[in-house]
Image (spheres, coloured by chain):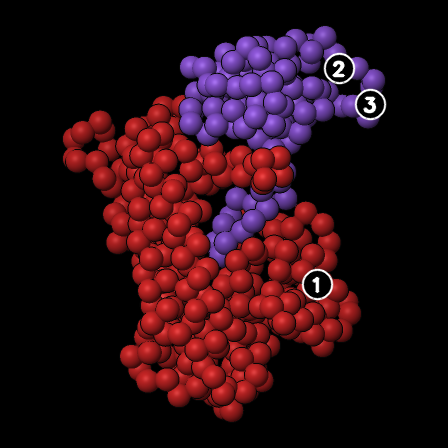
Amino acid sequence: MTLQANFDPHAQLRALYQALLSNQDCFDEFKRLLALYEFDPEGRDAESSEASSIRKTLNERIRNWVGASFEGLSANQTLQWRAIIVEERFNVSLSPWKESNTY
Amino acid sequence: MTVHDLIDELYAAFADRLGDPIGARARDLPRALKLAPEPDLPWSRVFSHEVTLGAPALFAEAMPGLPSSMVREATLVHLLAVVDAFGTDRLEDQQIDPSPGVLAVLGQLRRERDRAMARLFRGPPPADLDFSAADVLTTSAIHRERATLLSARSVDVTFYERASLDKQCAGLVASVALARVAGWDRRRCIAVRKTLESVALGLQMYDDVVDWEDDLRRGGSWAVCLMMGERRPGVAGDRATEGASIRIQVLHSAVLGTMLVGALAHMRAARRRASALGAFRLAAWAASRERRLEALVSAERRSAGYAVRAHALAAWAGEVLA
């Protein structure tokens, strides 16, 4: 599956968002690769070769989904995505009996 | 003053009246219940929907001339009742430890809730608005839910909705009480209750869709139980299996879409009743939820699991794509 993306970084992120929204397989693979990505930017200057390899694989997969022009996620962007998708740190809205938002 | 401001003011005053150290524990209750990541967050930051903790204040729009003191008392009753029910659920479900501090705060919540109710009615409340019955029903519903989810047995929508409403029954009392003291007749008081029941079911069904995998990891998911209930006997077994297989089964069963359709129907009913009662702010909120659910139902039909993914990506989309 390839979605249309152009060189506008915002449009590229929107294309990635649409790919993740519309396809369970893309979402699952994205989440699985993010879960494997481990890098503590405060503990060291550069990501390990293993982390770099995972990010490279992740970006290749994203290009398959949204098009070859996708610039790729930086280390910081990958960490941000990981915080949202894997660690679920940013979903804090609640309704009366929502039980999943535990800290 | 917004409803959220009123909620925070009422709870802060309640905590101040308790005095420290229990007042400090009351202020930190959202974190103690594992609903907030940091200390002393106001309830308005924990619950995004005004109706959750401020329902009576929203119905008060339809009761012109009612003294603001009555609206404040009813909102305090509602706020404390819902927070107590939340805490009870966390304790009964063993999601938090029954620390003496939490138990003491919940006890104070119930006492102040009952005192505020007595002030609202200038005496003991009518038997059908006494919280003792609601407390018993809430606890029994929490136990029934736990047993059902752990067994992963099949249920139908009627069972699911009854279980959900029983668990949330404490959140219906204060708004009906306010309608009663405002002089509303029986028919309109029933309409208030039914409006809130629809709101509760609409929100609950949506949450049970977007959190179904998290719920399953914690012990059980209503989506799985409802999927089992939709199966014809003898078709594909009568028990769900584990892991990836169960996810495929849920996605292929379209049960998530069915639950979203249910949520949409309830939110539509809430909007219509709130509008007919003159609670236009509540009706407008329900209408916005209705539009969101319509979009999700449509997308879920096109791509199973859409609502779960949209929820997972919502915070990011709000920050980056807005």
Disc 1 + disc 2, Cβ < 8 Å = no
- Which residue is disc 3 drawn over? A43
Q: Nearer the viewer, residue B224 or B76?
A: B76
Instruction: Quarter of the image for the C terminus of chain A: give it.
Output: top right
Kindly tell me whether residue B171 is visible in this rendering. no
Chain identifier matching the red colour in the rendered picture: B
Answer with left or right where residue B81 lies relative to residue B13: left
The amino acid at mark 3 is Gly
- Which residue is disc 2 drawn over? A47
Q: Residue at x 45, y 73 (%)?
A: B59
Local SS, label 1:
helix
Query: Where is B79 relative to B32, above or below?
Result: below
Query: Where is A83 relative to B193, above or below?
Result: above
Q: Residues within 10 Å of mark 3 (few under 14, many from 20)?
A: few
Question: In terms of image quadrants, where is residue B142?
Answer: bottom left
The amino acid at mark 1 is Arg
- Which residue is disc 1 drawn over? B27
Answer with left or right where residue B241 lies relative to residue A42: left
Q: Colour of chain A?
A: purple
**For the view shown, which residue lies furthest in the bottom direction?**
B122
Answer with left or right where residue B208 lies relative to residue B228: right
Q: Residue at x 31, y 46 (%)?
A: B261
